[in-house]
Amino acid sequence: MKQGDIVKGRITNIKPYGAFVKINDEIDGLVHISEISDGYVRSIEDYLSVGDEVTLEVIKVDNNKISLSYKTQNKKRRKKRESTEVTSGFKPFETQLKAWVEKYQKENN
């Protein structure tokens, strides 16, 4: 196993600093909290749960320690912000308000 390899693994434990992953019977690794998402991660459990099968990228192999990245393989595409233009203002509300009040008064008298 080397840096850049894409592997599948199962989440075995979650700590405040990262998630432990079992890649196969002999190899375990760690996904540090900084490798969960590009954004702020309040809790790893917002992204992963024990038992999840995940696809990860090997980012470092140092002796028997394997560092993994979740965010490189599981990016969520962000929607482009769409601009909207309000052209009607409160006119629809003004025209409907009278009808709503009349309907309410009929139903409750």
Image (cartoon, rainbow, N blue to C red):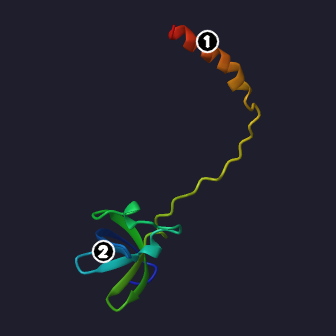
Residue type (three-letter) at the residue carrying disc 1: Glu
Residue 95, above or below 25: above
Q: What element carries label 1?
A: helix
Left-right relation of 8 to 70: left
Residue 100, above or below 109: below
Q: How crowded is mark 1: few (under 14 residues within 10 Å), some or many (20 or more)?
A: few
Q: Residue at x 67, y 16 (%)?
A: 98
- At which x and y percent is residue 73? 46, 67
Q: Nearer the viewer, residue 61 or 82?
A: 82
Residue 97, above or below 36: above
The quarter holding residue 60 reads bottom left
Q: How crowded is mark 2: few (under 14 residues within 10 Å), some or many (20 or more)?
A: some
- At which x and y percent is residue 49? 32, 62
Left-right relation of 89 to 49: right
Which residue reaches farthest bottom?
63
Which residue is disc 1 drawn over?
A: 102
Which residue reaches farthest front?
109
